[in-house]
Image: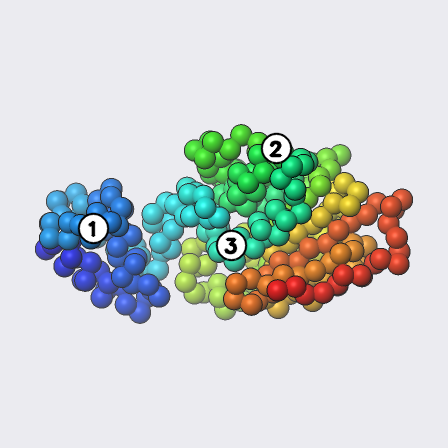
């Protein structure tokens, strides 16, 4: 069969199991052939050789079984960066780019400082920030050694040198360290969340998805512990679930943060909340809770 025929057949096979069957077919076939999608359009009348056909059929079978396209390709684009991926880390999603954008808004390009990314995974967030703010210094931590190897590989391949990585359970290995900005996309799904049985989430590391206390445990922990690692006037920014914004803002207020806001993603869903922390000497009690609002 020609490439065009293979694509039609593959798209039909993926119907019902993918929201983008034709696109998936093109991405997998291009990957099997070691080419880009443009090559498929140009040479649609060509036939596959034995190795290409075997590779494509293997990829197609895996995708039909539900495996994420990003893991099958071994890469994903995030905030303009091409990242290597593996099942050791979450698949970066467009919604998380909001976390990057909100952090960059707090980091003047003409200034400098120290930024911490907790639960860095593939390094997507910290590398996007570091690529845009070369004069700032960044640290990415993760409990998973496999995830850190992936993040370090991505940093090298992208030529990002202003990032260091550290194995740590959040702040545990960072005693005495303080930062101007701390960001995190922590686990925030409940163990009973039905999304865990659907789509890509079935194949992603559960430890990076699920938190105790109906998904709030890690968010609560970070809000409580971050003040010991923030410089005066430093910010904590957290990604969270669409129904968690009000609870996260309340936790920020209880912990003494101000300038508390929640920002919506492109779908209009509450996705990122942030707060500023002042030291006891600088903190004005009358400011607690001010700025507690949602911002699209």
Horizontal arrangement in the rendering, residue 120 relative to residue 245 (left or right) = left
Q: How far apart are the alpha carbons under marks 3 and 2?
A: 35 Å
Q: How far apart are the alpha carbons under marks 1 and 3?
A: 36 Å
Q: Nearer the viewer, residue 46 or 67?
A: 46
Mark sitting earlier along the chain (3/2): 2
Q: Is residue 177 above or below residue 52?
A: above
Q: How far apart are the alpha carbons under marks 2 and 1?
A: 41 Å
Crowd around label 3: few <14 · some 14–19 · many ≥20 (10 Å): some
Secondary structure under the numbered disc 3 in the rendered image: helix
Where residue 92 appears, x then y in whole percent? Answer: 48, 51
Where residue 100 appears, x then y in whole percent? Answer: 57, 49
Secondary structure under the numbered disc 2 in the rendered image: loop
Q: How many marks?
A: 3
**Residue identifier under label 1:** 40
Q: Which mark is residue 135?
A: 2
Horizontal arrangement in the rendering, residue 52 relative to residue 218 (left or right) = left
Task: Name the front one of labels 3 and 2.
Answer: 2
């Amino acid at each position: 069969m020609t490439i065009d025929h293979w694509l039609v057949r593959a798209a039909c096979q993926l119907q019902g199991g993918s929201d983008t069957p034709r696109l998936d077919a093109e991405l997998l076939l291009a990957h099997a052939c070691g080419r880009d999608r443009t090559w498929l359009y140009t040479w649609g009348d060509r036939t596959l050789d034995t190795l290409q056909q075997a590779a494509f059929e293997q990829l197609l079978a895996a995708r039909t079984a539900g495996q994420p396209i990003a893991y099958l390709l071994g890469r994903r684009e995030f905030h303009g960066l091409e990242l290597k991926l593996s099942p050791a880390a979450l698949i970066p999603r467009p919604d998380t780019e909001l976390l990057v954008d909100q952090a960059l808004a707090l980091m003047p390009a003409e200034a400098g400082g120290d930024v911490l990314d907790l639960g860095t995974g593939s390094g997507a967030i910290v590398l996007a920030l570091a690529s845009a703010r070369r004069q700032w210094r960044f640290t990415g931590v993760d409990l998973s050694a496999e995830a850190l190897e992936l993040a370090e590989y991505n940093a090298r391949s992208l030529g990002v040198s202003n990032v260091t990585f550290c194995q740590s359970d959040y702040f545990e290995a960072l005693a005495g360290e303080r930062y101007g900005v701390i960001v995190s996309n922590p686990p925030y799904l409940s163990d009973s969340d039905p999304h865990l049985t659907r789509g890509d989430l079935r194949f992603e590391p559960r430890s990076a998805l699920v938190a105790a206390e109906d998904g709030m445990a890690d968010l609560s922990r970070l809000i409580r512990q971050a003040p010991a690692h923030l410089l005066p006037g430093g910010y904590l920014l957290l990604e969270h679930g669409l129904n968690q914004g009000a609870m996260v803002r309340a936790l920020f207020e209880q912990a003494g943060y101000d300038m508390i806001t929640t920002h919506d993603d492109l779908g209009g869903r509450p996705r990122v909340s942030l707060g500023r922390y002042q030291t006891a000497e600088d903190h004005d009690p009358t400011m607690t809770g001010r700025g507690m609002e949602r911002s699209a």
